[in-house]
Amino acid sequence: MFHRLHTQLTLFCTFITGLILILMVCVCLLISESGLRQQSRSSFIQNLSSLYQEIQDDSTLSLEWLSQVSHNYGVLLQITDRGIPLFYQQIAENTDVSALFDAARQIAAAQYKIDLDSSSGPQNKIQRAEFSVKFRRQTQDLSSGTDVWASAALIPKVSGSIGVIVLQPLTTLSARIWRQRLFFGAACLAGLLLLFLFSWHFTARMLAPIEENRRRQTQFIAAASHELRSPLTVMLSCISAVRNGIAPDPDAYLGTVEAEGMRMSRLIGDMLMLANADNHSWHIHPAPVELDTLLLETWESFETLAHSRGFGWEIRLPEDPVPLCVCDRERIVQVLEILIDNAFSYTPEGCRICLSLEYTGQRKNPDGTFRTHPLKKYRNCMPRDRSAKRQLHSIPETGSAKEQSSSTFCICVSDNGPGIPDAQKEIIFERFQRLDDSRKDKSHFGLGLPIAKEIISLHGGTLTLEDTPGGGATFRILLPGK
């Protein structure tokens, strides 16, 4: 389907852009040809003025002079003195050219009232007219159907008037115009080819995200169907065993059905979250939050579980007070729970897992200048009671969200376990992607990290995966400050 759509879009884009290109080329060609014709006609008229002035000023016209003028100007001449053609024309003209001169003479007499056969004429000035003649027969100098620029003039002389007919074939101009048309045509074809290639690659790049999205949707549906089928199969088996009376302990089977139902409910909830994120209908409710307090509460909620599994569960908070962070508290807690739960699932017993917070930004000095606070010093916090927590956060908050400029909050969940292979790092945030060791754990569907990444993206932050120095994995959350 996408291949056919790709071809159709390419042809459509090429047709539309090619049509515009051809139209613009035709307009440019018409303007250029009009300019060439105008330039050639202006040159012809300018040459006529010089030619007529020379004929009027010279007392005698030699055969050599006439031949040189005809060659230099690229024209055909017929000069009559008192209606009698000169000897040069009598030996040079052929039948077809003579017919063309006759046609020009008739047009001059009928339309411009210039009688070239008359012996009398203007006494002081040259009487002239320029026009075009369509020639229909083939000769050595003129081709059939070619326009010929013509000029007829009565030039006053001492002894009377001289009639002159000047013809300029447009074969040279026509050849120049045709060469220009061929050039424009070749350029247009090359442009169409380039447009086709550009449209082909452009539509391919345009359709690539759509095709990739469809592929991911197909994979998502297939994976979701598999994940939903597993608990559904267990539930149906347990119900069948209880109904047929072959279950030794019906309560245990019903407990299994309830557990699988809850598992299916969690999976459907995660899928709905991602669907809302894809539809851009998933919203957050930001508010000022003390991140150090939030991290400490999260750390305490996992302390018992970490102790039961034999983990070294640590937290590191900055020594200096941390400004308020504008975020959705519940969503940030959800992200932390996902990351911590993954760390607990993947890290072997006896390893160390650390939850840390770091703040970087600028604060104003009393004189109005800024000072940088990297805040790289930490305090290790492992309070066993609430009083320690209250004492820990009794430090007055000297900074506020309004005082910050270019600040960043960095939350890390790191461990010193086996780490994540490089091949898995590229796809770890994709949906239904799980490490092989976690596939036995039914509580993981491969949707936690995609959900966490979507939540952080809604906050305008980033979620990245790095290697822990010395071995292990570190998930780093960067949240922008205000």
Image (cartoon, grey):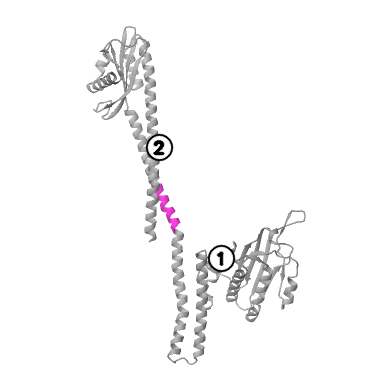
Query: Which residue lies at the image location 39% right of the left edge and 60% below the top edge?
Result: 2
* Disc 1 target residue: 283
Is disc 1 in contact with disc 2, using a CB cutoff of under 8 Å? no
The part of the image, by quadrant, that contains residue 395 is bottom right
Q: Is residue 185 above or below residue 474?
A: above
Task: Please state which amino acid type lies under the numbered disc 1.
Answer: His
Q: CA distance from mark 1 to mark 2?
A: 55 Å
The quarter of the rendered structure image containing the N terminus is: bottom left
In the rendered image, residue 475, in percent from the top left (x then y), is placed at: 60, 68
In the rendered image, residue 253, in percent from the top left (x then y), is placed at: 49, 87
User: Which mark, residue 28?
Assistant: 2
Element class at badge 1: loop
- Name the side, left or right, on which 37 lies relative to 359: left
In the rendered image, residue 330, in percent from the top left (x then y), is placed at: 61, 70
Q: Is residue 268 above or below residue 175?
A: below
**Which of 46 and 355 lies nearest the eye of the viewer?**
46
The part of the image, by quadrant, that contains residue 183 is top left
Query: Which residue lies at the image location 60% right of the left edge and 77% below the top edge?
Result: 348
Q: Is residue 61 above or below residue 168?
A: above
| Region in magenta | 193-207
Task: Please state which amino acid type lies under the numbered disc 2.
Answer: Cys
- Name the side, left or right, on which 285 lies relative to 403: left
Query: Which residue lies at the image location 39% right of the left edge and 17% below the top edge?
Result: 50
Q: Is residue 469 visible?
A: no
